[in-house]
């Protein structure tokens, strides 16, 4: 046991927890008005691994509720929305395949987030309750031979990946 490692982990978890808005949205940068899928997955998973199940689940729920409200998958959700009442879930299967920037990035994180919730949060019923949505995120990406002869995920050219691409 190393107290320095324990201190660093406690500080990291504290930092993540401070970035969760009262709505449940994870907003890791100042002046951000949106909660992004790509910014939410790793912190959510870390919270689960360190026993902060409630905070982790709030992040997933917030992103899911935003999709229900919009009636579609989105890479980001407004960070200040209160989802006290929601419309009925849309027919998720009617909205596939995805188009635009939502074809790869956003939907690819949802199955990972539900997996983390199942593995670390111990909530198997959530998979059953939201199964159509989860399948929607997988099926809608359009990774097929008809869409892409190489079977690759759509890449939007987002700035997040530019450093990695230029370093190859």
Image (tube, rainbow, N blue to C red):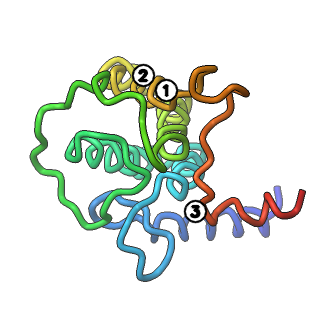
SS at mark 1? helix
Would you say 94 lies left or right of 75 here? left
Instruction: Tell me which residue sits at (35%, 28%) in the image.
Output: 133
The residue carrying mark 3 is 13
Give the quarter of the image for residue 152: top right
Q: Judge whether 47 appears above or below 125 on screen.
A: below
SS at mark 3? helix
From the viewer's side, name the closer residue of 129 and 142.
142
Would you say 168 lies left or right of 98 here? right
Residue 138: give its label: 1
Query: Where does the image place residue 52, in percent across and percent down from the top left?
Result: 48, 49
Give the quarter of the image for residue 148: top right
Residue 38: give its label: none
SS at mark 2? helix
Query: Where does the image place residue 91, in percent across and percent down from the top left?
Result: 22, 24
Instruction: Tell me which residue sits at (47%, 23%) in the image.
Output: 139
Q: Quadrant of the C terminus?
A: bottom right
Q: Nearer the viewer, mark 3 or mark 1?
A: 1
Q: Residues within 10 Å of mark 2 (few under 14, many from 20)?
A: some
Instruction: Tell me which residue sits at (53%, 58%) in the image.
Output: 39
Residue 135: give its label: 2
Q: In the rendered structure, which disc, 3 or 1, sits on the residue that comes first in sequence?
A: 3
Q: Residues within 10 Å of mark 1 (few under 14, many from 20)?
A: some
Q: Quadrant of the N terminus?
A: bottom right
Q: Residues within 10 Å of mark 3 (few under 14, many from 20)?
A: some
């Amino acid at each position: 046991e190393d107290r320095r490692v324990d201190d660093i982990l406690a500080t990291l978890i504290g930092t993540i927890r401070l970035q969760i808005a009262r709505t449940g949205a994870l907003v890791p940068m100042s002046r951000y008005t949106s909660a992004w899928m790509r910014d939410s997955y790793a912190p959510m998973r870390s919270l689960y691994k360190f026993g902060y199940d409630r905070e982790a689940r709030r992040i997933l729920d917030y992103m899911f509720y935003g999709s229900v409200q919009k009636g579609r998958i989105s890479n980001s959700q407004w960070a200040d929305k209160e989802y006290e009442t929601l419309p009925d879930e849309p027919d998720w299967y009617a909205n596939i395949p995805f188009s635009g920037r939502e074809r790869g990035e956003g939907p690819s994180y949802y199955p990972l987030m539900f997996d983390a919730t199942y593995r670390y949060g111990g909530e198997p019923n959530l998979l059953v309750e939201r199964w159509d949505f989860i399948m929607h995120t997988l099926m809608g990406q359009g990774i097929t031979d008809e869409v892409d002869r190489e079977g690759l995920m759509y890449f939007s050219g987002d700035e997040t990946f530019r450093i990695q691409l230029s370093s190859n």
